[in-house]
Amino acid sequence: MAENICIESIASISPLGITKEDICSNYQKTTHLLKEVSFGDTKAWVSSLSESAKLEVNTIRNSNSRYQNLDDSVLYGIYAARKAVEHAGWGEKENFGINMGSSRGATGLFEKYHSDFLNNNTAAVLTSPTTTLGNISSWIADDLKSKGPTISHSITCSTALHALLNGMAWIKSGMTDKFLIGGSEAPLTPFTIAQMKALKIYASKSNSAYPCRALDLEKQENSMVLGEGAGAACLTKGITEDSLAILEGVGFATEPLKHNISLSANAQCLQESMLMALKNLAPGEVDVIVMHAPGTVKGDVAEYTAIETIFGNSMPALTTNKWKVGHTFGASGILSLEMAILMLKKQNFLGTPFKEYDSPAQINRVLINAVGFGGNAVSVLLKTPKT
């Protein structure tokens, strides 16, 4: 029998906070963490880091002269990675791999350097090395003094869960016993906001109690809101007394592209990824699904339709965190994973204001979905190690 791969630790930096206590507390509240911010001549709803989180980022930036010119996405990743490794008890120079992805990468620095180029017709010396996508994992590896493989990638909104797939594959190959995975995103910049608004999927109502209505299947308008943050998890072979969750199943699928943000009405890619993650497990064995649910009309309904198709009369309790913290692109999957682990550990269902379900009597299995532009889906099935 193949040995289990488990999540040994997980850490994040996001609008929810940086400590386990703050994150748990914010999840218990029915209020969102979104605010309206000016971007040039326009305003947009966003979810930004807490003040305590921003202080931690500045502390890292000022701790090393080499960190002064790094993008926020790199610093967010360094913070989350440090905490995850610390919680797992991994030492310096230990042989573990790193796969930290990002959808957009160094958005802030890229926009700054490009603006400077348009004004001066020259590029700053550090433009290329500080804006490449590999920048995030490389700096994390340097900061942690790790000796294993270092990987970066971008698969839009399913980036972090693809990192988990990679980490599992490396461990199963026997080439390493440990892998640090995650995603980091700092997308709250004028150009990134403008791109989302151009797609007509961004939240526009300023008088709504909940600007992002993710998992509200009755909404008539798109309501996606961007958030920022990072998360990292330590994967290990075998179950220990400290294991947070067993990675019981994973699935992935990609839809044929009909347009650049293609997702079919019944989210075929998610149906396939969920079925792969379930393997031979009966649908009724899943207690909760943390949906991708970005807050768009078509996206939320398509995913719900896919879940209905797979689970039928055995529908688990459904939830998402995007109504509260926004959509963090490449980091969204790892934040959903963290939410799932909280529910497994605390045995407390974290719902949304838009959909009511009886809380499961027990939470033993949680399925997490993520899907990116182009219909690139990943599903991860977590099982409590306590059973």
Image (cartoon, rainbow, N blue to C red):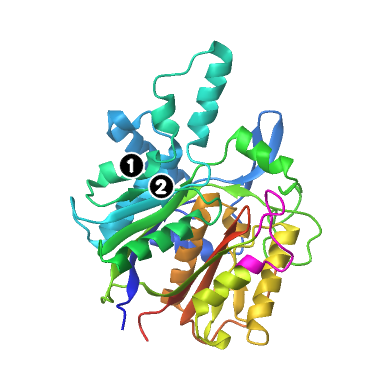
Q: Position of residue 121 (x, y in %)?
A: 54, 12
Q: Nearer the viewer, residue 172 or 139?
A: 172
Q: Contact (CB < 8 A) between labels 2 and 1?
A: yes
Query: For residue 63, what is the image quadrant?
Result: top left
* Residue bearing mark 2: 152
* Residue occupying the point 50% across, 75% down: 277
Circle 1: residue type: Ser
Q: For this view, does 274 lie left or right of residue 238?
A: right
> Mark 2, residues whose alpha carbon is within 10 Å: few (<14), some, or many (≥20)?
many
Residue 195 visible from this viewpoint: yes
Q: Secondary structure at mark 2?
A: loop
Distance of label 2 from label 1 (alpha carbons): 8 Å
Q: Position of residue 313 (x, y in %)?
A: 67, 87
Q: For this view, does 346 lie left or right of residue 117?
A: left
* Residue occupying the point 67% across, 37% down: 194
Label ID, residue 138:
1
Query: Dominant secondary structure of the magenta stretch?
Result: loop
The residue sitting at the top extreme is 120
Q: Earlier in the sequence, mark 2 or mark 1?
A: 1
The residue sitting at the front extreme is 256
Q: Position of residue 326 (x, y in %)?
A: 60, 53
Q: Nearer the viewer, residue 278 or 63?
A: 278
Q: Secondary structure at mark 1?
A: helix
Label ID, residue 323:
none
Q: Is residue 306 above or below residue 26?
A: below
* Residue occupying the point 25% across, 61% down: 175
Q: Is residue 257 magenta?
A: yes
- Report the span colored magenta: 256-269
Circle 2: residue type: Ser
Q: For this view, does 67 lie left or right of residue 22?
A: left
For the N terminus, the quadrant is bottom left
Residue 15 visible from this viewpoint: no
